[in-house]
């Protein structure tokens, strides 16, 4: 079984930073960046779980839900990852999104 702790830690850190961010930062793009990340992680998890099923897009639940959406999608992805390369790629995805979000 793959230890996905690096991914869950990166996801939790980003989500915590989003929750602590002022509304103005969320409005200036941090929430949109978080939603984009959540959607990408959800898509990756769906493709690993059911590659033949039609992909579903995570809805935009608003800027104050972005941290929760990142957490849910990140934890879902962590549950289905099976190799180190995909894990490293997912961690890098989270770290890059956090950098772009500026939080």
Image: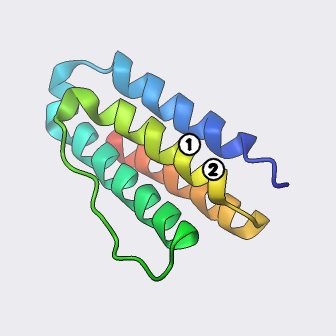
Residue 78, numbered label: 2
Residue tagged 1: 75
Secondary element at tag 2: helix
Q: Give how far across and how far down residue 88 sits, in percent.
A: 69, 60
In-front residue for pair 28/65: 65
In-front residue for pair 30/48: 48
Indicate the quadrant where residue 72 lies.
top left
Q: Quadrant of the C terminus?
A: top left
Q: Give how far across and how far down residue 57 sits, in percent.
A: 27, 61
Classify 10 Å Cα crowding around label 1: few (below 14), some (14-19), many (20 and above): many
Q: Give how far across and how far down residue 64 sits, in percent.
A: 22, 26
The answer to whether the residue labelled 1 contacts the one labelled 2, judged by CB atoms less than 8 Å apart, is yes
Q: Give how far across and how far down residue 86 sits, in percent.
A: 66, 67
Where is 15 relative to 8, above or below?
above
- The answer to whether residue 87 of the structure is visible from this angle is yes
Q: Residue at x 29, y 47 (%)?
A: 35
Q: Residue at x 57, y 70 (%)?
A: 48
């Amino acid at each position: 079984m793959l230890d996905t702790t690096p991914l869950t830690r990166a996801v939790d850190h980003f989500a915590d930073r989003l929750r602590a961010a002022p509304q103005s930062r969320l409005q200036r793009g941090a929430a949109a960046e978080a939603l984009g990340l959540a959607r990408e992680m959800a898509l990756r998890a769906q493709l690993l779980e059911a590659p033949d099923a039609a992909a579903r897009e995570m809805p935009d639940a608003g800027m104050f839900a972005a941290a929760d959406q990142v957490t849910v999608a990140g934890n879902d992805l962590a549950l289905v990852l099976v190799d180190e390369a995909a894990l490293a790629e997912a961690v890098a995805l989270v770290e890059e999104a956090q950098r772009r979000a500026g939080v």
